[in-house]
Amino acid sequence: VFDRGMYAGPVGWFGGGESEFAVGIRSALVEQELGALIYAGTGIVEGSNPYLEWDELELKTSQFTKLLKLDLPISNKK
């Protein structure tokens, strides 16, 4: 019931009559002067610990934040 937005993006190459692509499930949309939207997901299922899922999400997006030198908000873990 909500717009999930981007979730994945194609990663690969083409040229010389050949190509190879895969689905990048960790993606970022970077727009000059607007910033970056970083996308990743976790596998939340019955019995998941939401705090551990959040840690996993932060780990997945950390390469983008390091590359773009972004500051992450501090988690309010209990």
Image: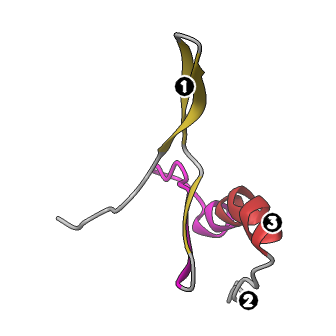
Which amino acid, by three-letter code, is at mark 3?
Leu
Judging depth in this view, the residue of 5 and 68 nearest the camera is 68
Judging depth in this view, the residue of 36 and 73 nearest the camera is 36
Q: Is residue 27 above or below residue 36?
A: above
Is 33 inside the magenta-drawn segment?
no
Which amino acid, by three-letter code, is at mark 2?
Ile
The residue lying at 52 percent from left, 53 percent from top is 47
Circles 2 and 1: CB atoms closer than 8 Å: no
Q: Is residue 17 above or below residue 11?
A: above
The residue lying at 76 percent from left, 72 percent from top is 68
Circles 1 and 3: CB atoms closer than 8 Å: no
Which amino acid, by three-letter code, is at mark 1?
Phe
| Residue 51 rendering spot, x and y as whole percentages | 65, 70
Label 1: few (<14), some or many (≥20) within 10 Å? few
The residue lying at 60 percent from left, 30 percent from top is 12
Q: Quadrant of residue 54?
A: bottom right
Q: Is residue 14 above or below residue 45?
A: above
| Residue 39 rendering spot, x and y as whole percentages | 53, 61
Q: Which residue is mark 1?
A: 21
Q: Which residue is mark 2?
A: 74
Question: Residue furthest toward the front?
Answer: 16
Q: Quadrant of residue 64?
A: bottom right
Q: Does residue 9 show up?
A: yes
Task: Tell me where the magenta segment starts and ends, as one range.
Answer: 34-55
| Quadrant containing the N terminus in the rendered view | bottom left
Q: Which mark is residue 39?
A: none
Secondary structure type for disc 1: strand
For the residues labelled 3 and 2, the Cα–Cα distance comes to 19 Å
For the residues labelled 2 and 1, the Cα–Cα distance comes to 35 Å
